[in-house]
Structure formats: structure tokens, C-alpha cells
Image (spheres, rainbow, N blue to C red):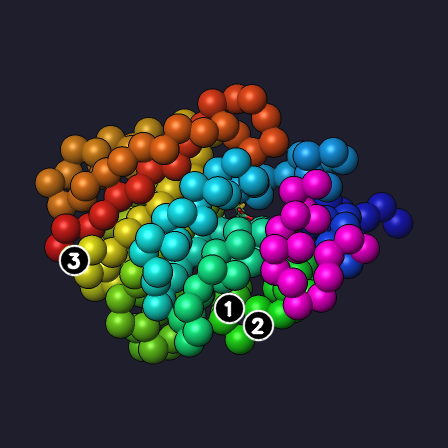
Amino acid sequence: TQSTRPQRILGAVQQNATRGDPRSVVRAIDQYCRNQEWAMNVGDEKGCILDSVVSEVNPATVLELGTYCGYSTVRIASLLPPHAKLITLEFNPEFAVIARQVIAWAGLEDKIQLVEGASGDLIPKMKEQFGVETFDLVFLDHWKDRYLPDTKLMEECGLLRKGSVLLADNVICPGTPDYLEFVRSSPRYESQYFKSHLEYTKVEDGLEKSVFLG
Ligand SMILES: C[S@@+](CC[C@H](N)C(=O)[O-])C[C@H]1O[C@@H](n2cnc3c(N)ncnc32)[C@H](O)[C@@H]1O
Ligand SMILES: O=C(c1ccccc1)c1ccc(O)c(O)c1[N+](=O)[O-]
Ligand SMILES: [Mg+2]
């Protein structure tokens, strides 16, 4: 029977990456998606910008919206200090099954909690069910029409504190116009655009970093 793209990505990791070596997992996925078949990982070029923001924030608590195969999950978690925690949300069970295996191959199960379900349902449960106070860093990379409603929901649920950083992928391609307008015009956010390219292509895209001012 025909394999799926996520299954082929997992295969590339198991064939080319070293167990327990997160950066080799990241490299194996980038090589596969650049040379064999495109996939919607944040990728190597935007990934370097992601790395620099993660290192600068040095977060104790991270929320990722949209796991897919776990590429950015592993990339972020590989840079976290000891005892830091990353919660990643994924509502497609097929993708979650693959991501768990990619995360395990990287040896990062202790830092990462993958929760299956829709962000709109899970965000209101973060405090009571997952023992979260606030998030130091949020990586938004799920369906683009959810960035704005979920940001408002995180504010309403008291999950953002003065200084919390939102980092949003794809603000140009496929684009998140309502989110971009909101964070750039709201007095409660200080935003900065990092110009880059859509993963594995020459098409313009970029990341928007927005600091919540409280
Ligand atoms: C672009 S992919 C994530 C890529 C990943 N962040 C990376 O860079 O490797 C988007 C993912 O978000 C998931 N997704 C979309 N909307 C969601 C929602 N509202 N709640 C949870 N997951 C969602 C999709 O199933 C898909 O796997
Ligand atoms: O929406 C797409 C998309 C649209 C059409 C075909 C394939 C992907 C996409 C493209 C690049 C991304 O980095 C990304 O996060 C997404 N996404 O689905 O969230
Ligand atoms: Mg993306």
C-alpha cells in the first residue's frame, strides 16, 4: 500500500539520522524535503531565525501550535535549557503518530509533550490540565486563519505575560493578513519582521516576532 509523506519523512530520519542526536534529525528531514519532496516544515532557512529567537528568549515554557512531523518541535527542543518544557498541539492523529516517533528518535521525549487536539479546545485547558502558568515563547505554525483567534484566546486565558514572545511562521506565504495587521497595530505588542523564504523554495516568506507588552 502507498506510504504517506509523513511516513516517508520518518523513514528518512530512521535511515539517515543518529538516535539521540536532534540536529542530525533536523538535517535528515531538511535533506529529504529539499532533495526528494517538499513538505511544510519551517525548514532550514527560517529555522536559523527560529533558532536565534529561541536562544535569545531562552524559554522555560514553550507552546507550539502545529506539530506535523515534529521538525520544528525537535529543532526548538534541542536548544532548550535543562528542565524547560515544550507543549506542542496537533489535531491530525496520523501526523501525531509520526511526530511521536521523530521526537523519540531525537531522544527528546522528556522535554516535549505532544497533545492531540485542536488549539481552540486545548488552549483554555492549559492551566488546569497541563499545569502551565504562562508561556515564555509561542511558535505559531498551524492553519493560518487560526493565528489571530488563538492569540486572542491565549490572552483571554492569561497564558501570556509581559515579555512573552510570539513567533509566527508564514506571515507572507501562505500569509496571515488579519494576524499581521493585529500584532502590528495593537499597542500591546511590539512586532518585528524577519524576511526569509518559504521552506525549500525561493518564494518570499518570513517570520513575525511579537513581544506581548502586558
Ligand atoms: C505547517 S504544519 C506544522 C509544521 C511544523 N511546525 C514544523 O515546522 O515542522 C501545520 C500543522 O498544524 C496542524 N493544525 C492545523 N490547525 C490546527 C489546530 N487548530 N489545532 C491543532 N493542530 C492544527 C496541522 O494538522 C498540521 O500538522
Ligand atoms: O498552508 C500551507 C500549505 C498550503 C497549500 C499546500 C501546502 C501547504 C502551508 C505552507 C507552508 C507552511 O510553512 C505552512 O505552515 C503551511 N500550513 O499548512 O500551515
Ligand atoms: Mg509554516
Labelled pair 2, 1 in contact (Cβ < 8 Å): yes
Under tag 3, what secondary structure?
loop
Identity of the residue drawn at 43% across and 56% down:
64
Q: Picture coordinates of residue 105 (x, y %)?
A: 68, 65
Residue holding disc 3: 162
Q: Amino acid at mark 2?
A: Glu
Q: Picture coordinates of residue 2 (x, y %)?
A: 85, 46
Q: Is residue 21 magenta?
A: yes
Residue situated in front as seen by the camera: 174 or 204: 204
Distance, label 3 to label 1, CA atoms, is 24 Å
Labelled pair 3, 2 in contact (Cβ < 8 Å): no
Residue 185 quadrant: top left
Q: Is mark 3 within 8 Å of ligand 1?
A: no
Q: Which mark is residue 109?
A: 2
Identity of the residue drawn at 27% across and 36% down:
192
Q: Picture coordinates of residue 44 (x, y %)?
A: 56, 40
Tell me if residue 8 comes above or below residue 124 in the rendering.
above
Dot 1: within a 10 Å radius of its alpha carbon, few (fewer than 14), some, or many (20 or more) residues? Answer: many
Identity of the residue drawn at 30% across and 61% down:
136
Residue situated in front as seen by the camera: 214 or 158: 214
Query: In which quadrant is the C terminus drawn?
Result: bottom left
Labelled pair 3, 1 in contact (Cβ < 8 Å): no
Q: Which residues are magenta?
A: 15-31
Identity of the residue drawn at 50% across and 43% down:
47
Tell me if residue 210 comes above or below residue 206 in the rendering.
below
Q: Is residue 103 magenta?
A: no
Residue holding disc 1: 112
Distance, label 3 to label 2, CA atoms, is 29 Å
Main SS of the magenta part reads helix
**Left or right of 25: which side holds 184?**
left
